[in-house]
Image (cartoon, rainbow, N blue to C red):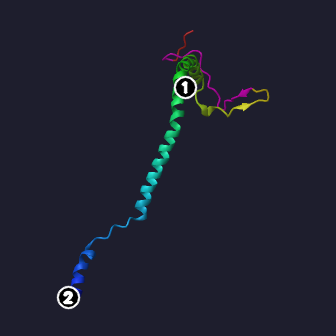
């Protein structure tokens, strides 16, 4: 009897200890996915860094040429955009056998009057 009492008293601390928490598959999986994504992104950055650096250098070299091109072409583009009132008024471009490209207007153009009438409807000649 004493032996059973001693064994039960000795075994109580073992039973009282908390079992280590069992990690759920969801928690472990999410952290593994996170770590995997971080590793993939780090690898991409290290591989892409030299190419991005070279692209930045090329853009720095092309900067003045692009600025002069914009200064020359910009006003002409504004003129063209000013002539095109709405892209919905045009059909899709058609290429002819000789290489010409036609862009037909599908809505009739309302002619602008040469003389604008005054506030009372009179026109100065």
The x, y position of residue 6, in whole percent, is 21, 83
Tell me the residue at 24%/83% (across/down): 7
The residue shown at (49%, 39%) is 46
**Residue 116 vertical position relative to residue 6 in the rendered view, above or below:** above
Q: Which residues are magenta?
A: 100-120
**Quarter occupied by the N terminus:** bottom left
Q: Which mark is residue 28?
A: none
Q: What residue do we see at 45% from left, 48% from top?
A: 38
Membership of 11 in magenta stretch? no
Q: Badge 1, how many Cα within 10 Å: few under 14, some, many 20+? A: few
Compared across the picture, whether 87 is left or right of 98 comes to left
Q: Earlier in the sequence, mark 2 or mark 1?
A: 2
Residue 70 location, quadrant = top right
Q: Residue furthest top?
A: 125
Residue 75 percent location from the top left of the image: 56, 18
Crowding near pointer 2: few (<14 within 10 Å), some, many (20+)?
A: few
Residue 10 position by quadrant: bottom left
Label 1: which secondary element: helix
Q: Marks 2 and 1, Cα distance to the nearest angstrom? A: 89 Å
> For the C terminus, which image quadrant?
top right
Name, please, the residue furthest toward the right: 97
14 over 110 or under it: above or below: below
Residue situated in front as seen by the camera: 99 or 67: 67
- Front residue (pair 39, 10): 10
Residue that label 1 marks: 58
Q: Which residue corresponds to mark 2?
A: 2
Overall secondary structure of the magenta section: loop
Identify the secondary structure beneath mark 2.
helix
Picture coordinates of residue 15 (x, y %)? 27, 76
């Amino acid at each position: 009897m004493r032996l059973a009492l001693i064994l039960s008293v000795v075994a109580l601390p073992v039973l009282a200890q908390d079992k280590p928490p069992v990690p759920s598959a969801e928690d472990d999986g999410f952290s593994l996915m996170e770590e995997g994504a971080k590793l993939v992104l780090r690898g991409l950055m290290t591989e892409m860094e030299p190419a991005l650096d070279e692209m930045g250098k090329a853009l720095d070299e092309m900067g003045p040429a692009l600025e002069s091109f914009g200064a020359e072409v910009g006003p002409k583009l504004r003129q063209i955009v000013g002539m095109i009132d709405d892209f919905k008024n045009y059909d899709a471009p058609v290429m002819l056998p000789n290489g010409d490209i036609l862009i037909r207007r599908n809505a009739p153009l309302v002619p602008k009057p040469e003389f604008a009438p005054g506030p009372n409807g009179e026109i100065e000649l």
